């Protein structure tokens, strides 16, 4: 089992049980207790878990799960969303992409495109693009956190140098009453600036985010050009407000 896979499984178990012992994790993952202790030490440095005597628990910080966990969550829905979103891509288009896990499956649909430019504040997105496409990649430089996401004032200012045809991004929650919300202030300020410098704002959100209202306002629903989901959400008011802007399979 790869280290990142093990981290993801540990994180899921801690999240589910609230607190777990080293022995429990060792049995569940068929891994030595020494390896589990090393994993917990590494994960604590990234604030993914908090070590306690004989085990671990979730930290008290209210934030999104780490990217490697989010990548493996609702994968089928994200693949459907990417397949729909790919209809907007075309040769010679320019794109803003945020660091969200929902945007990552879209990269596979850029493989055969010519003269596409992608502007991103994600080292992970840029690496995938470089490995899998011929896209011209522009990385918005700034402070790095979670190892892959670039944020801060320099990134916000860098966004202002560009204007793209499309923007693909996601959120922590979407609701009729609160609009788009997020748990990450560093992501919010960059995404809000990207919205001001693009022609089409396309939200990619799986239906698990419907009705969720988190700490920070990302935007009103009115600024969205399209919202792509894997299915029609079970929220008649949200569906009514979005109208023809809601695209599903």
Image (cartoon, helix red, strand yellow):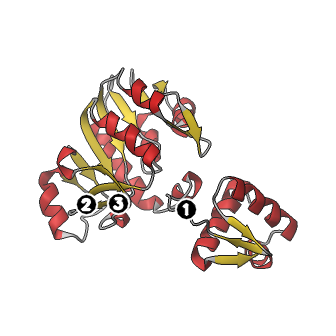
- Residue that badge 2 annotates: 178
Using the numbered discs, state the Cα–Cα distance from disc 1 to disc 2 in whole angstroms: 22 Å
- Residue that badge 3 annotates: 173
Cβ–Cβ below 8 Å for labels 3 and 2?
A: yes
Cβ–Cβ below 8 Å for labels 1 and 2?
A: no
Question: Quick check: 18 above or below 72?
Answer: below
Question: Quick check: 113 above or below 27?
Answer: above
Closest to the camera, between mark 1 and mark 2, is 1
Label 3 Cα neighbours within 10 Å, binned few <14 / some 14-19 / many ≥20: many
- Residue that badge 1 annotates: 61
What numbered label is drawn on residue 199? none
Residue in view at x 57 percent, y 66 percent: 60
Give x and y (percent) for residue 156: 41, 31
Q: Secondary structure at mark 1?
A: loop
Q: Earlier in the sequence, mark 3 or mark 1?
A: 1
In the rendered structure, the answer to whether residue 24 lies left or right of residue 210 reads right
């Amino acid at each position: 089992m790869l280290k990142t896979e093990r981290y993801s499984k540990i994180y899921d178990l801690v999240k589910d049980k609230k607190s777990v012992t080293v022995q429990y994790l060792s049995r569940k993952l068929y891994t030595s207790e020494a390896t589990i202790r090393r994993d917990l030490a590494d994960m604590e440095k990234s604030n993914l878990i908090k070590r306690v005597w004989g085990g671990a628990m979730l930290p008290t910080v209210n934030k999104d799960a780490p990217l490697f966990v989010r990548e493996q969550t609702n994968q089928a829905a994200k693949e459907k969303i990417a397949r729909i979103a790919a209809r907007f891509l075309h040769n010679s288009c320019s794109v803003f992409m945020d660091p969200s896990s929902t945007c990552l499956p879209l990269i596979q649909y850029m493989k055969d495109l010519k003269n596409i430019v992608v502007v991103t504040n994600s080292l992970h997105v840029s690496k995938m693009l470089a490995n899998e496409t011929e896209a011209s990649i522009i990385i918005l430089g700034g402070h790095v956190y979670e190892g892959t996401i670039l944020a801060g004032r320099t990134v916000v200012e860098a966004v202002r140098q560009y204007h793209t045809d499309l923007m693909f991004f996601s959120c922590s929650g979407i609701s009729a009453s609160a609009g788009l919300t997020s748990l990450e202030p560093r992501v919010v300020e960059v995404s809000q600036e990207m919205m001001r410098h693009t022609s089409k704002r396309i939200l990619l959100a799986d239906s698990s985010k419907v009705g969720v209202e988190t700490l920070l306002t990302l935007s009103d629903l009115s600024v969205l050009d399209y919202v792509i989901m894997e299915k029609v959400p079970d929220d008649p008011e949200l569906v009514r407000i979005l109208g023809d802007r809601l695209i599903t399979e």
